[in-house]
């Protein structure tokens, strides 16, 4: 038996898998995000641990015999979060999250002062990453910075609570900007640029390796016969790739979650900093991956539904079959954008609204706008030499057939839709836990059964290509106008 714990932004999810990776039990616990100032996004680290205890307690009640036989636990979590601990492992302040935008000035200064962030780190210095967050704390909260003993990512704080160990994995740690991504090791020079040393960092392991064992008191709490190992785990997207079997070069997925992702696995470190591509270590040894990331995918649809006081499902149910793009254009930049713009200040908007515009056209425009942004991501990956012809769909938005048809036609890829089941980060985390317990990755990261595949629609490709070309003119026009 194996546990997968996924520390998400809005909830913690735990799943229990059997030896053949069948789902035995699952549980979730909600989380909240605090936004005390414009551009800020924070969370209490202790709330992650309370939610983990809640989900694990729930599974232990539902399946006590199976919980007793757990041999491995894997972790995944939202990336880049700056969790600052003192010498007693107490959080010094709320965690600064991945979608926090306060450190834009520090990003520009760090890039200019230490250009190796772009080469060794392999990524643009963006406000979402961990390093500029620490520079912001260093400049604005010096009394807190002086007391920092360890900097952990969200899932690694949970690991500390589970095992008592300060450990991180390669995939998640690559998102700090302190990792020499090609060498899969901390960079002393990049750490020094933000006033830190290796002593502030956790020990590194591969995602499928053992990072520690569960504390005795937790084994007793959950009725486990012997202490299971805890795997290195992975950042949420790398763990999702493990869940859908995207661990071989050229395999990948498109994610329609809170954020949107086009993810492709590589056999080497392949950065493209000019287009704000994310080039990270994968969660399995000897592999890397590239991602194009947009900040508001289903978040865009959720915003429209909230604004119109309906549910997202009610909005998409009105659409019916799509025979071409919406007459209205939508930029999905509700909280800025990463790939390809790296722009924390740009904002969203509708363009082309007229007296005859109805709710249905706004919904259609939102789906199109997210798809156009994902097309930007695919173009950035292709500029870095990466091309995929098939992607697996993951995330809540992938339940929309219409949305996937639009994306498949725009990206010119076939999208495979898994059969019923959860093939996201929690499954990938459980699989990493299984690999750590068994001491091998052989046969662990298989592709899921596919319900159906969505090929690019020839009748949509030309019209959507034209609409995408018009849509791409909006961002530079808005920036020139001072937005």
Image (cartoon, rainbow, N blue to C red):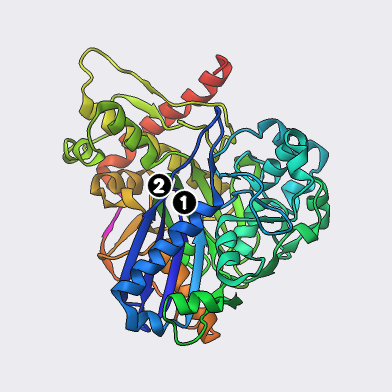
Using the image as rendered, state which of residue 44 and residue 243 is in the foreground: 44
Q: Is 278 placed above or below 111 here?
A: below
Using the image as rendered, state which of residue 367 and residue 23 is in the foreground: 23
Q: Which residues are magenta?
A: 453-457
Kindly indicate whether the residue at mark 1 contacts the one at mark 2 (C-beta within 8 angstroms): yes
* Residue 94 seen in the current view: yes
Can you give x and y, in whole percent of width and height, for residue 221 in the image? Answer: 45, 75
* Residue 240 seen in the current view: no
Q: Which mark is residue 69?
A: none
Q: Which residue is mark 2?
A: 411
Within the image, what quadrant is residue 98 found in?
A: top right
| Quadrant of the frame with the C terminus | top right
Q: Which residue is mark 1?
A: 262
- Picture residue at 79% right of the left edge, 43% below the top: 115
- Picture residue at 56% right of the left edge, 28% below the top: 37
Can you give x and y, in whole percent of width and height, for residue 4 in the image? Answer: 44, 69
């Amino acid at each position: 038996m194996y546990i997968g714990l996924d520390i998400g932004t809005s909830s913690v999810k735990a799943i229990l898998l059997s030896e053949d990776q069948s789902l035995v039990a699952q549980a979730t616990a909600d989380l909240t995000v605090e936004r005390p100032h414009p551009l800020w996004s924070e969370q209490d680290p202790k709330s992650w641990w309370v939610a983990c205890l809640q989900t694990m307690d729930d599974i232990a009640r539902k399946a006590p015999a199976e919980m007793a036989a757990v041999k491995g636990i894997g972790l995944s979590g939202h990336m880049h979060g700056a969790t600052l601990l003192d010498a007693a492992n107490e959080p010094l302040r709320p965690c600064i999250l991945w979608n926090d935008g306060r450190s834009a000035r520090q990003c520009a200064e760090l890039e200019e002062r230490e250009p190796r962030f772009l080469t060794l780190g392999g990524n643009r210095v963006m406000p979402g990453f961990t390093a500029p967050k620490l520079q912001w704390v260093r400049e604005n909260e010096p009394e807190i910075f002086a007391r920092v003993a360890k900097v952990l990512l969200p899932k690694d704080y949970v690991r500390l609570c589970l095992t008592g160990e300060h450990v991180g994995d390669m995939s998640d740690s690559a998102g700090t900007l302190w990792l020499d991504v090609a060498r899969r090791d901390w960079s002393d020079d990049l750490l020094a640029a933000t006033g830190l040393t290796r002593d502030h960092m956790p020990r590194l392991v591969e995602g499928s390796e053992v990072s520690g064992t569960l504390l005795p008191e937790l084994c007793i709490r959950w009725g486990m016969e012997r202490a299971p190992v805890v795997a290195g785990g992975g950042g949420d997207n790398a763990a999702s790739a493990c869940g859908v079997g995207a661990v071989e070069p050229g395999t990948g997925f498109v994610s329609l979650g809170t954020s949107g992702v086009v993810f492709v696995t590589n056999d080497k470190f392949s950065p493209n900093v000019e287009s704000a591509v994310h080039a990270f270590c994968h969660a399995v040894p000897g592999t890397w991956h590239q991602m194009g990331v947009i900040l508001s995918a289903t978040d865009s649809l959720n915003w429209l539904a909230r604004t119109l006081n309906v549910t997202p499902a009610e909005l998409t149910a009105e659409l019916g079959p799509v025979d071409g793009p919406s007459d209205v254009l939508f930029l999905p930049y509700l909280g800025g954008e990463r790939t390809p713009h790296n722009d924390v200040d740009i904002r969203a908007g509708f363009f082309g609204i007229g007296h005859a515009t109805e709710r249905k056209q706004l919904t259609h425009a939102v789906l199109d706008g997210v798809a156009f942004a994902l097309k930007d991501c695919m173009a950035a990956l292709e500029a870095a030499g990466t091309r995929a012809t098939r992607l697996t769909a993951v995330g809540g938005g992938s339940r929309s057939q219409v949305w996937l048809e639009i994306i498949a036609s725009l990206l010119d890829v076939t999208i495979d839709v898994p059969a019923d089941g959860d093939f996201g980060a929690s499954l990938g985390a459980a699989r990493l836990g299984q690999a750590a317990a068994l001491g091998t990755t052989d046969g662990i990261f298989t592709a899921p059964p596919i319900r159906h595949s969505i090929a690019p629609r020839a009748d949509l490709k030309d019209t959507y290509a034209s609409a995408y070309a018009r849509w791409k003119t909006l961002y530079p026009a808005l920036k020139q106008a001072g937005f």
